[in-house]
Image (tube, rainbow, N blue to C red):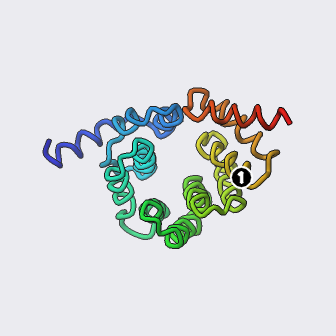
Amino acid sequence: MHLSTSIAVALALTMGQNVADVRQLYDAGKYREVVGAIGEATAEPDKAYLAAQSYERLKDADSARRAYELMANIDGATPWASIGRSGLQVMNKQLDEALASADQAVSLNGSLPEAHFQRGIVLMSRREYGDAMEAFNKATELDPGFAAAHYYAGLASYRAKRVDLMANHFETFVRLAPNAPERPEVESILRTVRGR
């Protein structure tokens, strides 16, 4: 398929699909459906971010890089461009640079849940679980329906030994994403904690 044709097809597929619908597919572990609905060449950065994350889950690093690059190359100083750069830098194991880019995204738009989420992803990669927990908590405060942020907030809280916060986030995650592939892991952790 010719490049301009594939871009046109990808853009046509995303029309009428709102981010919440696509995020539900992501939360259910339907990563192929997400990238099928979005493709790599979306002009909407929030969808490009979901595509990049889905490609990472599918272990398709090349496509994930292209989706992050698409975001990183948005004109102007935008939080989405910073998030795209941060995603690329995490993939390249440039964690100091990735954190600086995520921090820039937060400073450009502190009310964007995905900016805090990306900051949390970087901090998890750096094994700074307390700070990651705070970043994911902020993402869930800004968007209480952001299931992936609840999952990672629970995981970071667990690793930071804040079991009280972990349980709340994991319970919310299971409620928001009942078909998530992480559900068995989350329920196992909750059973272990409650059994103490």
The single residue placed furthest to the left in the displayed view is: 2
Residue on which disc 1 sits: 159
Examine the image and state in which quarter residue 185 appears.
top right
On-image quarter of the N terminus: top left
For the point 68% across and 52% down, the residue is 156
Where is residue 171 shown, x and y percent of the image? 72, 34
The single residue placed furthest to the top in the displayed view is: 179
Mark count:
1
Above/below status of 77 relative to 122: below
Above/below status of 64 relative to 107: above
Above/below status of 16 relative to 75: above
For the point 46% across and 36% down, the residue is 22
Q: Give the amino acid at mark 1.
A: Arg
67 left or right, relative to 49: left
The single residue placed furthest to the right in the displayed view is: 196
Where is residue 8 shown, x and y percent of the image? 23, 43
On-image quarter of the C terminus: top right
Specify few, some or many for label 1: CA neighbours under 10 Å numbering under 14, 14-19, or 20 or more: some
Where is residue 92 shown, x and y percent of the image? 42, 64
